Amino acid sequence: MFSFNSTATLHHVTPLPPSTTFAQALEALHNHDLLIRLDPEFAHYETLPLDPSAPSTKRYKVTDHMHALPKGLWDSTVSFEAEMTNTEDGILWIVKAPLGLVQRTTWRCLRTDGLGEEDKKGQAEWSLVEDVEIRANRLLVGTVRGKCEENWRGSHGRFCEFLVKEGEGEKK
């Protein structure tokens, strides 16, 4: 039987600033307010009550400005539920949006230098690794995939800028 549902996957890797430690990157990845605000289409958000069956998952109602969506598909703003769960190497972020869209994203801090340990100064080469799975109807998957491809460099860049600013603040 023909299905109108589809799935798309994306994988993006961005080297973190050289002075970034794993602990600094992880602390930033666990900063939900920071991550929500990295979205270039972000309008506002509010915290939702915890789900008793998943007490380690924080829930938010996020509203974005979505001017580039096909006319009539959504209003110019879209509100969706975001579930964010801290992991040992980053964060799992599940978005549940209108029209049955479910987007599962992980942002992880992973070593990229191929070495098994940090150098004598406590430094290593780290990268932000983003994996995205988008599930929805075919039209919506294509649109959301395009928005993700359009926005990831800016979001990763702002994340790296935050790390640099935090690193400079620690040196003072």
Image (cartoon, rainbow, N blue to C red):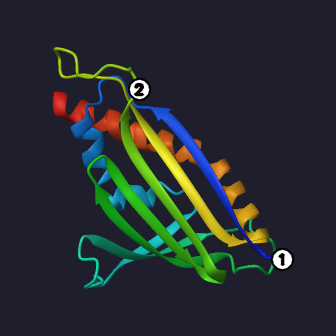
Q: Residues within 10 Å of mark 2 (few under 14, many from 20)?
A: some
User: Which image quarter is the C terminus in?
Assistant: top left
Which residue does the image show at 61% across and 49% down from the upper left?
10
Q: Nearer the viewer, residue 123 or 37?
A: 123
1 lies left or right of 153: right
Q: Determine which quarter of the picture holds residue 116.
A: top left
Q: Residue 39: x, y in percent?
A: 52, 57
Can you identify the residue that label 2 sits on? 112
Q: Determine which quarter of the picture holds residue 171.
A: top left
149 lies left or right of 3: left
Q: Secondary structure at mark 2?
A: loop
In the displayed structure, would residue 168 be above or below residue 113?
below
Under mark 1, the amino acid is Phe
Q: Nearer the viewer, residue 75 or 128?
A: 128
Q: Residue 118: x, y in percent?
A: 23, 22
In the displayed structure, would residue 64 be above or below residue 34?
below
In the displayed structure, would residue 26 be above or below residue 121?
below
Can you identify the residue that label 1 sits on? 2
Q: Secondary structure at mark 1?
A: loop
Under mark 2, the amino acid is Thr
Q: Residue furthest front?
A: 1
